[in-house]
Amino acid sequence: MNLHEYQARDILRQHGIPVPPGDVASTPEEARAIAARLGGRVVVKAQVHAGGRGKAGGVKLARDAAEAAAHAATILGMTIKGLPVGRVLVAPAADIAAESYVGVVIDRASQRPVVMVSAAGGIDIEAVAVESPGQIHRLAVDPRYGLLPHQAFGLGLRLYRDTAQARAAARIMEAVYETFYAVGASLVEINPLATTPDGALVALDAKIVIDDNELERHPEIAALRDSSAEDPSEVAARRAGLSFIKLDGSVGCCVNGAGLAMATMDLVKYYGGAPANFLDIGGSSNPQKVVAALRIITADPNVRAILFNIFGGITRCDDVANGIVQASEQVALTVPLVIRLTGTNEALAVEILTRAGFSALTDMDDAVRQAVALAAGRGVGAR
Ligand code: GDP
Ligand code: MN
């Protein structure tokens, strides 16, 4: 789950990291009022789940409240990386002498949280990572001991020659590491960690990604979810209790079990197609879930064919068949459906589907080949 910058800033501030105050606005008038209350120069920033807002024109400095309102009006009408901007953060503008990068991320290779720092922070950090990776310093932390003070200070010295600044940076890193665990994050990032002309360090941007598996342990963090900023299909799937990830292919996939769903996607690719989604309707079966799944898949205009792949173990094939029949009565199906069912109550399922005018296959290869051909606009001999 992604947090917005303003939420991440609040969390970092609570953990003692120097973050300027600020507030969110959803209209230019609100932005004007916040800027007037803060006084002086402010920065107006698009609140969307995307980086690179600065380059996209979603971060603008304003001299006064009137200019803040004007910038808010522009930014609130923008779409950044496909995401419409519904709110802006208005915060006092800092004077920047230098920009660093500080982040903590889960590293699968070392299976540890890794602290990453660079003195070349700012909006081009991705380019730095590609072009001069030597400018990014990494430290894998042993989670049994946490980030030790001398390690943090060593990293601080990678950023600042001045020992007082290095020490301040070290304290910030320790607080970032603490925050990382406190909220169940997979990523916490400050970019830029700015140096002001008087030498103080201040976090001007914050990004936190929460590990979804941690949400149950952190209800206060789960409550920060902004569904309006998420893909509507993923929101609908979560509400229906489905594991769903939207992809950009044309074969809609509805599968029971994450492993079979992955294998199905592999096979779709193998036969030259592209999956439109990952979808696991879960181990136990319930026709309502199938209805919800079909609604979500058919709402995607890229979908040209829908493939059901059901291995009936705990899931009963007849439940899925009933779900498909019910769903086809409730959802207008404008694309072909290929159904493969095998296992528990398979014969009953085939009977239900045949009675409703569907045909069902039992071989996975056959079904995937058919779905791929149909999605590509090619007919299948058998039909
Ligand atoms: P991002 O592009 O989505 O990462 O958004 P950031 O919040 O990092 O802002 C992009 C850039 O805008 C930063 O790297 C800064 O150079 C600049 N910026 C952001 N906040 C301020 C500020 O308070 N004062 C000044 N002078 N520049 C800022
Ligand atoms: Mn940034």
Image (cartoon, grey):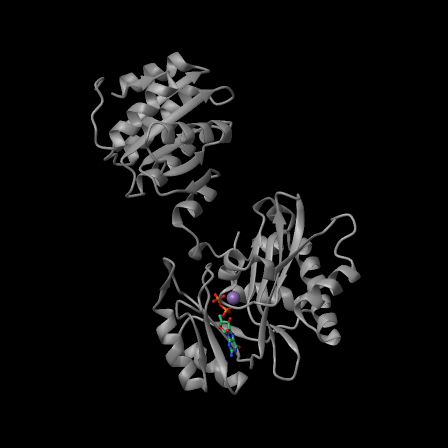
In which quarter of the view is residue 139 placed?
Answer: bottom right
**Residue 239 falls left or right of residue 340:** right
**Residue 358 falls left or right of residue 34:** left
Q: Does residue 15 appear anywhere in the picture?
A: no
Relative vertical location of residue 240 with respect to residue 325 in this rendering, above or below: below
Q: Does residue 229 appear anywhere in the picture?
A: yes
How far across and down, in percent of the image, does residue 40 sit?
A: 52, 87
How far across and down, in percent of the image, does residue 13 sit?
A: 64, 69
* Image quadrant where one finds the C terminus: top left
Relative vertical location of residue 187 with respect to residue 343 in this rendering, above or below: below
Q: Nearer the viewer, residue 341 or 171?
A: 171
**Residue 52 falls left or right of residue 339:** right
In which quarter of the view is residue 147 placed?
Answer: bottom right
Could you tell me how many numbered marks the image carries? 0
In which quarter of the view is residue 32 placed?
Answer: bottom left
Q: Residue at horizontal 27%, vertical 36%?
A: 304
Q: Nearer the viewer, residue 208 or 159?
A: 159
**Residue 32 falls left or right of residue 305:** right
Q: Residue at horizontal 74%, vertical 76%?
A: 164
Q: Residue at horizontal 67%, vertical 61%?
A: 176
How far across and down, in percent of the image, does residue 282 sit?
A: 49, 31
How far across and down, in percent of the image, does residue 77 sit?
A: 34, 69
Q: Nearer the viewer, residue 28 or 199?
A: 199
